[in-house]
Amino acid sequence: WSAEHRHPCSALGMIYALEVISSVYGGPFTTAIKESLLLQDDRGTSFIGSHASIDTEHMAELRVVLDTLRDDAARDAIVESSIVNFHHFTRIFESV
């Protein structure tokens, strides 16, 4: 919605939130799912587990892109979108 109605760079804020969450919490989240559901090996968690390590590389790539932005409106849109997405993802994780 924000990318269409506010600023196209809002999408980068959502991507930033997703990359941070998966790189920081992907490993512990995978472990918690496996333990709580008594899963063997990577069954049901391979996507989350693989992204935990891959997304640290994506974070570095995204930082390069974000560091090149000089437009204040674009930066503001990214920050606002990041905050909104972190808020909503936090609510989702709290409800699980």
Image (cartoon, rainbow, N blue to C red):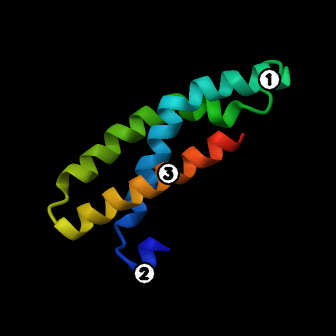
Q: Secondary structure at mark 3?
A: helix
Q: Nearer the viewer, residue 95 or 80?
A: 95
Q: Which mark is residue 50?
A: none
Q: What separation in Å lies between label 3 and label 2 (alpha carbons)?
A: 20 Å
The C terminus lies in which quarter of the figure?
A: top right
Is 19 placed above or below 82 here? above
Q: Which mark is residue 36?
A: 1
Q: Position of residue 1 (x, y in %)?
A: 50, 74
The amino acid type found where label 2 is placed reads: His
Using the rendered view, name the quadrant where residue 59 is placed. Answer: top left
Q: Secondary structure at mark 2?
A: helix
Q: Position of residue 93 (x, y in %)?
A: 63, 41
The amino acid type found where label 3 is placed reads: His
Pointer 2: what residue?
5
Q: What separation in Å lies between label 1 and label 3 (alpha carbons)?
A: 25 Å
In the shown orientation, is residue 76 left or right of residue 80?
left
Q: Nearer the viewer, residue 81 or 27?
A: 81
Instruction: Farthest residue to the bottom: give it.
Output: 5
Q: Nearer the viewer, residue 41 or 7?
A: 7
In the shown orientation, is residue 84 left or right of residue 70?
right
